[in-house]
Amino acid sequence: MKSAAIFDLDGTLVDSGSAYFSAERDTLAHFGYAGFTVADHSSFTGMGMEEMWKEVAATWGLDISPAELLKCSNRFYLRHAREGVRVFSEVVELARMLRDAGFAIAVASGSSQEVIEVVLSCTGLDHLFPIRVSAEEVQQGKPEPFVFLEASRLLSVEPDRCVVVEDASVGVEAGLRAGMRCVAVTAAAALAHPRSACAGRLLLAERDVLDARAVLRWITQGEGVVRPGMVDS
């Protein structure tokens, strides 16, 4: 029976956090608002970009539409992305291994379709991910499950045959709510605090010691293959 792996893009496949922060800061500065900090950026990590700008506009009391903010931030982000973003090589290796093992592969991201296309092209990953889904194509972004369910539909794979690879808690929540298993590529500090007890459905894998082969075995064989730096909950 066919299986699939659905990867988040930003923070999972590519280290784009600094580029997004710069784009968000530049956008607010463009409209005359200063003081956007790294902490502000971090508080919105994992959200779809449309939802993020709705929250920013409401929190900061901006008299600018979220759509206009999003359009501006995408323009700034694309400029930064074309200057180069770093790939997380071990996560990319996991994607290649899953593809070679016969898994259908997709990207499902909170970013716009244009951003997804540019980042995949700039990093040379476009050939690896023929199916790309943006949150702008579904009714709501993460933590709602729709972006992953749409990827499942396009791949013609039932949700319970899909595994999601994510870095953000809202993405993990979206994957689990979609009825999929999930690999959370996370920082060491988060390993001791799983978000939910989903027996056999959630693997927390420490990014700094990520072992793509061990994660592949967990995905394909299930429990009993957890290694140091990995927590199966």
Image: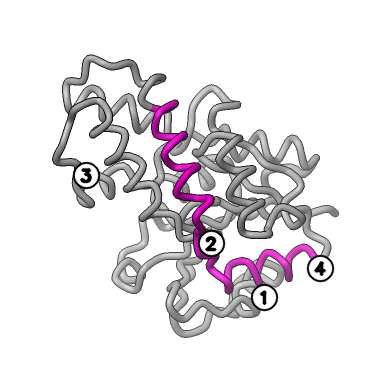
In the image, residue 183 sits, relative to residue 29, either above or below, namely: below
The part of the chain drawn in magenta is: 70-99
- Looking at the image, is mark 2 or mark 3 earlier in the sequence? 3
Residue at position x 43%, y 73% from top? Answer: 206
In contact (CB < 8 Å): disc 2 and disc 4: no
In contact (CB < 8 Å): disc 1 and disc 3: no
Residue at position x 70%, y 72% from top? Answer: 221
Label number found at residue 100: 4
Q: Mark 1: give few (<14), some (14-19) or many (20+) Cα within 10 Å.
A: some
Label number found at residue 40: 3
Q: Which amino acid does label 1 sit on?
A: Arg
Find numbered disc 3 in the image and state the secondary structure of the residue it sits on: helix
Residue at position x 66%, y 51% from top? Answer: 121
Rendering quarter of residue 153: top right
The mark lying in front, picked from 4 and 3, is: 3
Find numbered disc 4 in the image and state the secondary structure of the residue it sits on: helix
Find numbered disc 1 in the image and state the secondary structure of the residue it sits on: helix
The mark lying in front, picked from 2 and 4, is: 4
